[in-house]
Image: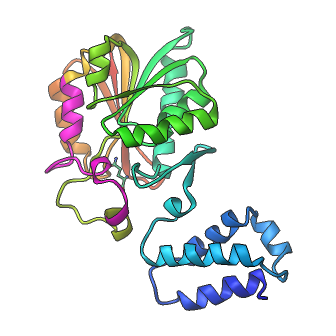
Amino acid sequence: MPSYHDVLWDTYRKLKDTDVSDEAVQILMLELCNMSHNDLFLNYDKEMPEELQKKFDEGVQRLLHNEPLQYILGYQWFYGYKIKVNEEVLIPRYETEELVANVLADSDYYFPDKDVIDIADVGTGSGAIALALKMEEPKFRMCATDISETALTVAEENARDLGVEVAFYQGDMLQPLIDKGIKLDILVSNPPYIPREQEIQKSVDEYEPHVALFGGDDGLKFYRRIFQNAHKVIKDKSFLAFEIGYDEKDAIIEEVKRYFPEDRYEVLKDINKKDRMLFIYHGI
Ligand code: GLN
């Protein structure tokens, strides 16, 4: 029977000339075996149980078919929370954790005295943003929308697993909020923003839901739709927080000026120094 070490290094060798990274292979092993790096190091020369080996080999085959590691494992860590994912939902990205962090900071800054803060995550997908925010800030009265029924099933399951209360509404962008007469202190969204013709990584294109990725010809279709109707769902003193594509800053600022001529806005960079977040401050 081969050891953990043998299995791992055999796989590295076999995959040397493929697109699959050693890192993905190692994470697959750690997560399937429920081990930390340290556990793996201590058990390196021990036999790897046959059952685990089989699962690992199956996972490696799926990686070879460009399937994202997170779909193989069935989850992604986001803001320290384990979020279930499948092909019905976009895999939460690390960049998006920064959106969550900034919303929390701004919420503290602008609404320090409020006991209840009304907030919505528009196009929630797996629910990652809504759930992380609600876990971090119990004062949030959180609701979340998505057009995809199957995505909401995943989001609801994640909410149950984390034991938090989020009201999920099926519908197109702001429509469910408008229908219900909901008024928000904070509107958050990471809408689909990739321009239709833009080339994207094979694994993303082949496996992730296109409805969560593509934002029309220039990528800005869904921001425009939100901007157009935002006044129906935001309070007089409120802010809006968006993730944006790294090359969309100038075009999106034009839209902000058009729809929110009186309001202050700010574009923030992510940790990779790419323009990534847009905040619009309405009446505050
Ligand atoms: N950041 C994602 C990607 O580049 C896109 C997410 C989105 O469109 N909101 O794959």
Does the image show residue 139?
A: yes
Q: Judge from the rendering whether residue 165 lies leftward or rightward of residue 179; answer left or right.
A: right
Q: In which quarter of the image is the N terminus?
A: bottom right
> Does the segment drawn in magenta span residue 213?
yes
Q: Judge from the rendering whether residue 186 lies leftward or rightward of residue 39; answer left or right.
A: left
Name the spot of residue 159 as percent of width and height, x first.
56, 33
Name the spot of residue 23 as percent of width and height, x first.
59, 73
Q: Judge from the rendering whether residue 239 lies leftward or rightward of residue 42; answer left or right.
A: left
Residue range corresponding to the magenta coloring? 206-228
Q: Which scheme is used to colour this image of the protein?
A: rainbow
Of residues 118 and 59, the one drawn nearer to the viewer in this rendering: 59
Examine the image and state in which quarter residue 230 appears.
top left
The residue drawn where x is 44% and y is 68% is 67
Of residues 57 and 232, the one drawn nearer to the viewer in this rendering: 57
The residue drawn where x is 18% and y is 25% is 228
> Does the segment drawn in magenta span residue 93?
no
Does the image show residue 101?
A: no
Q: Compared to 182, does 49 lie above or below?
A: below
Q: Judge from the rendering whether residue 57 lies leftward or rightward of residue 96; answer left or right.
A: right
Name the spot of residue 20 as percent of width and height, x first.
49, 78
Name the spot of residue 76 as percent of width and height, x first.
55, 53
- In this rendering, the count of numbered labels is 0
Examine the image and state in which quarter residue 2 appears.
bottom right
Q: Compared to 186, does 51 lie above or below?
A: below
Examine the image and state in which quarter residue 28 appears.
bottom right
Of residues 40 and 71, the one drawn nearer to the viewer in this rendering: 71
Of residues 100 and 138, the one drawn nearer to the viewer in this rendering: 138
Q: In which quarter of the image is the C terminus?
A: top left
The residue drawn where x is 84% and y is 75% is 43
